[in-house]
Amino acid sequence: MTTQKEIQLREEPTPGFYIKARYVVTFMAAVGTVNLYLLRNSLNIAIISMAGVKNSSLDVGNKSETESLQTTVDVCPRYQTNSTTDVHFKQYQQGEFDWTLAKQGLLLSCYFYGYTFSNIPGAWIAKLFGIRATLGVVSFVSSILTILIPLAARLNFGFLVAVRLLIGLLQGVTLPTIMQSIGIWSPPCEHTRHIAISFIGVTSGNMVAFTLAGLIVASFGWECVFYAAGGIGCLWSVAWVLLIHDSPVKHPRISKQESNYITKSLSEAASIESGKINLKIIPWRKILTSKPYWSTVVPHLSETWTTAITHYWVPQYIAKVLGFSIENVGFLSSLPYGLNVFSLIMSGFLSDLILLKTQIHKTFLRKVFSSIGLGGTALSFLILPLFGCNHTLAIVLICTSYMFVGCNYSGYRVALADMAPSYLGIMYAISNTFSCVLVLFATQIVGIMLGDGSLPYWKTVFYVTAAISAFGLFVYLWFGTSELQPWAKSKIKQENKDETKLFVEMSETL
């Protein structure tokens, strides 16, 4: 079996001090995902100061600021009552732009319309032009556009929407290209750790974006958020182009030992002579009718629903239902992301260690980690409503619900790299496109489900989330596999085999 060959293959040591090229690619990809979320989410914090709220919305004369923020529906008692009203009130001042909530919603969501549209075309571009040029160019241009956001905002609202939509259109290329880089640079027995490290930014990027944006707005003003995010993006883009190459074969500084190890490891799955594949030979029909592939798409959508809940609604649950003071909401909302990063890294290295030290089957191992990831999330959301207003246990379960999500990167997500590394970018792009579409609607659906925001409605949302996670797990356990799919084997390698066979037959006739 291919799995046994991968486990037995060992990399020859490179003499002297040598930083492995594939880990440079993975590290830069991880920083790239942080950069992606920094450019995406800076507006989420800056818009608070840009638009603020109408002064009339805080009628300080008629009621205290604390009373104006309290709801009259069924929620938990306040956890803290010593909030400083002066500090809190500064966060709700009149902004520079007179944007209605509808306009603000449009501004925040328009990014995802562009982002969703460009996922699959982005994977094509990465195939045609290589990972180096593709990611370097789109990141640099989107960073420049981010720097121009303050100017666009002051010129015209429609122009600002267009800029944000274009940024999303460009950045939709990022994650499929990073997945493609893993398929090209990562030996199969190391897929888990490289995917886990590369996607650290998916969670840590949110922490960095919200924390950094808040500090910059408070100290220097909202404009500097975009200058800082765009500047960091430009620096990363230049570094990516200077350090990264399209394949081990094209890398001028890679050691012969590492290049041979990567090439031999991937020889059973894909040809990496050029790092590109002719789009005409992509087996679209076989991909789109593959049960193993769709067994990874369904849990991806389940995970996306959980992410949307955590990213957009959990902060409101902590503030408005559990009654924590506004000073603590940001910190408590970031805890699930920190724990997610921890579980993502630990599960990635643990999975690879198990594969190297044991004879366990890949499919079984991927399903074990998926069971921990999706099953743990489902269990957390199932238990959460049972504790009602127990603040401590509620926060613990909110944290565990997203902490377990990190284990999915050692489960169904890495199964894509196992079953078809040659088309990893394309397959991820398709799955991520469906995921982005779900994000567009999930937030609005949950808003409708919450009704007046009282505790019984929140319980319904948590039960539905638990059911969705459980369904995703069931689909993957039933149909999932990590076996290399017949349609994913290298066309180029097969042609070389045919040519060799023909040469031998001709020699024998002579």
Image (cartoon, grey):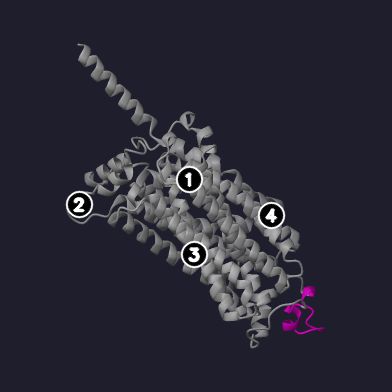
Residue appearing at x 64%, y 88% in the figure = 82
The amino acid at mark 2 is: Pro
Residue at numbered disc 2: 13
Spatial separation of the CA atoms under disc 2 and disc 4: 58 Å
> Who is closer to the viewer here, 337 or 245?
337
The label nearer to you, 4 versus 1, is 1
The residues bearing labels 3 and 1 have C-alpha atoms spaced at a distance of: 34 Å
Q: Residues within 10 Å of mark 3 (few under 14, many from 20)?
A: many
What's the amino acid at mark 3?
A: Phe
Secondary structure under tag 4 reads: helix
Crowding at label 2, few (<14), some or many (≥20) Cα neighbours within 10 Å?
few
Q: Which mark is residue 404?
A: 3
What residue is drawn where x is 62% and y is 62%? 465
Q: Please name the residue shown 43% across and 41% down the image.
A: 420
| CA distance separating discs 1 and 2 | 35 Å
Vertically, is 184 above or below 446? above
Tag in front: 2 or 3: 3
Quarter of the image holding residue 43?
A: bottom right
Identify the disc placed on residue 506: none
- Could you classify mark 1 by the number of other residues whose Cα lies within 10 Å: few (under 14), some (14-19), or many (20 or more)? some
Q: Nearer the viewer, mark 4 or mark 3?
A: 3
In this view, the residue in front, 303 or 78, is: 303
Residue 337 lies in the magenta-colored region: no
Which residues make up the magenta segment? 56-71
Farthest top residue in view: 510
Residue designated by label 4: 155
Left-right relation of 115 to 509: right
Query: Which amino acid is tagged 4?
Result: Leu
Q: Which residue is mark 1?
A: 137
Viewer-nearest of discs 1 and 2: 2
Q: Is label 2 in contact with label 3 (beta carbons under 8 Å)?
A: no
